[in-house]
Image: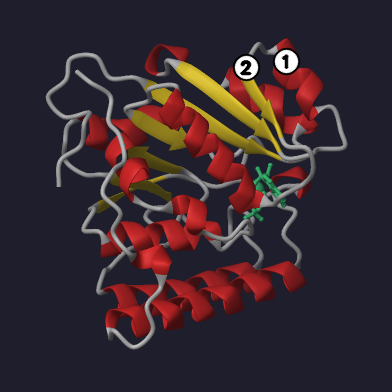
Amino acid sequence: MTTQARGKAACKVVVVMPAYNAAKTLRITYDAIPKENVDQVILVDDGSSDDTLKIAKELKLEVFVHARNFGYGGNQKTCYTEALKAGADIIVMLHPDYQYDPTLLPNLIAPIKAGETDVVLGSRFLRGDVMRQGMPWWKFLGNRFLTWLENYVLGLNLAEYHTGYRAFSRTVLEEVPFLLNSDKFVFDQEMLVQAVHLGFSIKEVPVPTRYFPEASSASFRASVRYGLSIVALLARYMLHRWALVDQKQFQCFPARYKRAD
Ligand SMILES: Nc1nc2c(ncn2[C@@H]2O[C@H](COP(=O)(O)OP(=O)(O)O)[C@@H](O)[C@H]2O)c(=O)[nH]1
Ligand SMILES: [Mg+2]
């Protein structure tokens, strides 16, 4: 699989931030982004009720606003659509809640730039003790079980699937039909299953994680719902692979357009 970024001298890197009530952490997150590695920062405000929008404008980000709260997946649909429109070659998703370290952006970008892989995940499980870093024990257990299940179904050996720190080549976003995905948190998993199904490669780089009240709003209840929706997703994927029930989400749609070189 080749990426458009490969072999090109100029490579536009766009950071997308799916934001929802991120006023307390947006500035510190943005300030920590190594600007010399990034060409553009896009923020999509998902109907926040705090000052997220005001701060994003003060920071002079490229801002898009949802008329209401669509959810985390709905937010990313706008993020990726706009990043493609902006001509991005590499797209990095960074949560504006300061949970993931923005200074590590170069590590996520480098393997795609070098043409080594199509997707890079910032994995919290490759180094360090995530429970010591503050991950609640029930999130830890859920993460371990779901990662095992996803590895089993997809035939991979990733350290985790649930990180919110991800980088994609343009080609991945052009070919994965992400607009067909959920507007909820399971969107992240749908993207990875689709990417694997279409033959894209995934590489992991270690990142630490931070847990504090503003960095994680997903409740126990929401996390259980998230876990169940992943099991349902994997079941649908197996049915598709066994050609029992056709799932549009996993069909391959050739790119409708490409930027001329
Ligand atoms: N909870 C939530 N987060 C959203 C939404 N839209 C965008 N986000 C962003 O998605 C990120 C992930 O949510 P978070 O609660 O931190 O999840 P967790 O860190 O996995 O527990 C945050 O940075 C939010 O700003 C939404 O509708 N709901
Ligand atoms: Mg978070």
**CA distance separating discs 2 and 1:** 6 Å
Query: Circle 2: is it few (<14), some (14-19), or many (20+) Cα within 10 Å?
Result: some
Circle 1: residue type: Lys
Labelled pair 2, 1 in contact (Cβ < 8 Å): yes
Does residue 33 appear anywhere in the picture? no
| Residue 151 place in picture, x, y as percent | 33, 73
The C terminus lies in quadrant:
top left
Q: Mark 2 is on which residue type?
A: Leu
Q: Which residue is nearer to you in this view: 127 or 95?
A: 95
State the mark number for residue 57.
1
Q: Is residue 148 left or right of residue 162?
A: left
Q: Tell me what residue is drawn at x 56 percent, y 44 percent.
A: 76
> In the structure shown, which secondary structural element does the residue marked by tag 1 occupy?
helix
Compared across the picture, whether 140 is left or right of 247 comes to: right
Q: Is residue 114 left or right of residue 208?
A: left
Residue furthest to the front in view is 256
Q: Which mark is residue 133?
A: none
- Which residue is tagged 2? 61
* Residue name at image x 17 percent, y 31 percent: 114
Query: Extreme left residue here?
Result: 7
| Number of marks drawn | 2
